[in-house]
Image (cartoon, rainbow, N blue to C red):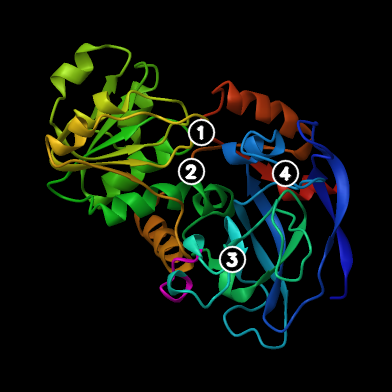
Amino acid sequence: MSVTTVHAYAAPAPKAPLEHTTVPRRPLGEHDVLIEIAYAGICHSDIHQVREEWGEGSFPMVPGHEIAGVVTATGPGVTRYATGDRVGVGCFVDSCRECADCRAGEEQYCTGGGAVMTYNGTGRDGEPTYGGYSTHIVVDENYVLRIPDGLALDVAAPLLCAGITLYSPLARGQAGPGKRVAIVGMGGLGHMGVQLAHAMGAEVTVLSRTLGKREEGLRLGADAFHATADPATFERLAGRFDLIVNTVSANLDLDAYLGLLGTGGTLVNVGAPENPMPVSAFSLIGGRRSLAGSMIGGIPETQEMLDFCARHGIGARIETITADRINEAYDRVVAGDVRYRFVVEAGSFAG
């Protein structure tokens, strides 16, 4: 494959609606694979970056880092994949490969210049990266994931961000039998956390603003569901949990949530609110509690997550759309009007 252009949907400028376009894809290098994208998930971070809510972006911007598809060509040195393999691509497509984090399989924390983001980034060749809202993508085989046969490509796509974002803190927090886990928020991230924590064997509680999603939460594996809008919730559940994973990107009263942890418990933030959230030192030292953060996972852990999901029949709950509905979908995501992840049929990017 020589340098070519592929169909895509891009935001031509900050806050602009996405529209059909074409973008270049590099020729296949020694260790590159060409992926024909089947589905691309819509992540809230796509919206944040298109609207420059997380800082200045690079435009035109082709979002999309929840990518599932099929290998259609390989470079001469590729050993991990062959034509026809079912594969995925997550939030990054390269890293320095030499720092301690990269050598440990924690490429997302690369300290040798940072991971190369799947979109809104700059590749090691100096060219801008364009994401999964397109028909094809070229990625080094070392940053590609294998999607097990037990996972349909459409429900697998959101696992490449939403799935690993929840799997990593749950696995590292040793969620399992005897552990009491709370998931804050029941959206695109939270609904994955409920399924994963349940499959790991933990006792799972959902903490959501209202009880509106209670029945769905219980169907997905939650043992209990509580409304945080009710102040009595924080009294009833004080000191109950070993691990809390906060998925929401709104500012919360962290002291109140830390009070739900038992001695030695941990509150992990995976949501990214726009403004800082204050916390009292006494909320931490009084119960030897920890406040932590987590960001996706490296390539080995992401593959581990995909294999785990295949074994346990876990996939995202999705609403499939065509590319001409992306702008509508963005507004619905912001309004919380999706259960629980939009996935775009990549064939529709061709217009």
Q: Residue furthest toward the bottom?
A: 77
- In the rendered image, residue 217, in percent from the top left (x then y), is placed at 34, 30
Which disc is residue 316 wearing?
2
Q: Is residue 342 left or right of residue 25?
A: left
Q: Amino acid at mark 1?
A: Tyr
Q: Could you tell me which secondary element the residue under label 1 belongs to?
A: loop
In the displayed structure, does residue 61 sit left or right of residue 83?
right
Q: Determine whether the residue tagged by mark 4 lies in a helix, strand or loop.
A: loop
Q: Are marks 3 and 2 in contact (CB under 8 Å)?
A: no
**SS type, badge 3:** loop
- The residues bearing labels 2 and 4 have C-alpha atoms spaced at a distance of 28 Å
Residue 43 can be seen, yes or no: no
Asked if labels 1 and 2 touch by Cβ distance under 8 angstroms, the answer is: yes
- Compared with 167, 83 (above or below) is below
Distance CA(mark 3)–CA(mark 1): 34 Å
Asked which secondary structure carries label 2, the reply is loop
Circle nearer the N terminus (3, 2): 3
Name the N-terminal-most of marks 2 and 1.
Answer: 2
- Find the distance from the CA under tag 4 to the CA under tag 3: 18 Å
Amino acid under label 2?
A: Ala
Kind of residue sitting beneath label 4: Gly
Q: Residue at x 44, y 66 (%)?
A: 106
- Identify residue for label 4: 57
